Amino acid sequence: MRINDPITLPVSGVTIKNRLCKSAMTECLADEYGRANIKHERLYTEWAKGGCGLLITGNVQIDRRYLERPGNVCIDGPQDEQQMEGLRKFAKAASVNGTVCFAQISHPGRQANLMVATKSPAPSAIQSGGLVPLPKPFEMSNSLVKETIQKYAKASKVCKEAGFGGVQLHSAHGYLLSSFLNPNANSRTDEYGGTLENRARALIETIRAVRKAVGNDYPVGIKINTSDFQKGGFSHEDALIVAEWLDREKLDFIEVSGGNYEQPVLITGEDNLLSDMVSVKRIGKKSTVQREAYFLKYARDIKKVLKRTPLMVTGGFRSRKVMESALNDDGISMIGLGRPLCLTTDCVNDLLDGKVDTLRSPETQWKLPWYVSWLRYLVVGNLMKVGGDQASTYWNLYRSGDGLPMEENPNMLLNMIRTNYRDYQVAVALKGLPKDDPTLQQNKPKSNLPKVILAIVIAYFVYRTLK
């Protein structure tokens, strides 16, 4: 089997032209009302021309009060003609070149963005840890859980009406559906908490509600964690059981990833980022497969329990050799790609045509400026590198949305400042939010920009002092 080979999805019967997928990445290009616009059209036209058989959008939020980041597209309630027109043009642009585009339907839960909300709904009122400041969570009532499930279904139906090729439900990375599965985030005593079966109930009911809303001829996928990589959290053993349950539902594919804001292995590929940051040299000692496909070893176990549902793995794939090994030796059906597509939008075409054997990797090509490069030997330097990688990824998506070429060698620290400031500006500009909702920032968002600038200034002066 080759990465060029098509795949037909088992429930909907939709055929995808090859085995490569642009996995979901947050774009944050929506306007002040959470509407899709010309920026989405520009970016996704380039990606659709770039070669992937499947594109999955960034988080499309079902409740515009709670965002993963300012600038998320929102489908919350009935859509007016302007909202629908933006979605239709988005879907059409992302479907050129025979490409199929799925909208990723999501709710951030307790990982909502603090620039927008001071409080956010969650399975339980348990604060998320990690390095990113987050709102204070409040426990969802039983009725709110059921109402939110229907929001997933209604948003999915809107996406079908707008012309998207399918939907993917986001139940990974610590967002709402994922946090229901996590014992560290879910201490409920009703039917949505306690045993694994109860903790998975919100997810299963959401899948069934969405399938009922869109019908069997429309593709529905799911994204789940192979593990939260946290003591006491959603474990790999839990994931195997949940995967077996999901295999019985009417799903067209399951995508696996891992981690959350407390343990962001989805970004770093390392299980212990916050407790024992590793150096580049240590990473380099791993095998090619370990360096590339850092969730593959967990995906192999999940594949063993699946009888009918195709499995997609996202996380670190770069070379044709490792991709086709996963397809042929591990039974993986699709390969998810992310950051290489934020360096050049057409890199997959070159891989499919045999012009290259390995995709360029931003995380190795992009470097910190000389005056902070010495910090790479410390935990703070590794964290700054991760932050700079993320910020530069965001910045290149903004540039493509504005019709500009992506930067090959961006200024990572400058992008950390620019993206934080941009998020702040977008948060301030948000309109149409309830004026009397006590969970919202009411146009007084808190920015991380001062902390980012302070860290950069301190690093510079420490360098000058040591020099």
Image: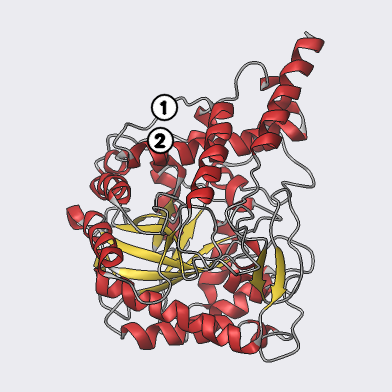
Front-lying residue, 63 or 313: 63
Residue at 49% across, 47% down: 426
Residue at 43% across, 72% down: 76
Give x and y (percent) for residue 111.
63, 61
Viewport quadrant of the C terminus: top right
Q: Residue 408 carries which label?
A: 1
Distance, label 1 to label 2, CA atoms, is 6 Å
Q: The residue tagged with tag 1: helix, strand or loop?
A: loop
Give x and y (percent) for residue 256.
52, 64
Give x and y (percent) for residue 420.
57, 39
Q: Which amino acid does label 2 sit on?
A: Leu
Q: Is residue 137 left or right of residue 246?
A: right
Which residue bears the numbered disc 2?
343
* Mark 1 surroundings within 10 Å by alpha-carbon count, few (fewer than 14), some (14 through 19), many (20 or more): some
Q: Which quarter of the picture shows residue 357?
A: top left
* Mark 2 surroundings within 10 Å by alpha-carbon count, few (fewer than 14), some (14 through 19), many (20 or more): many
Residue farthest toward the front in the current orientation of the protein: 436
Front-lying residue, 302 or 348: 348
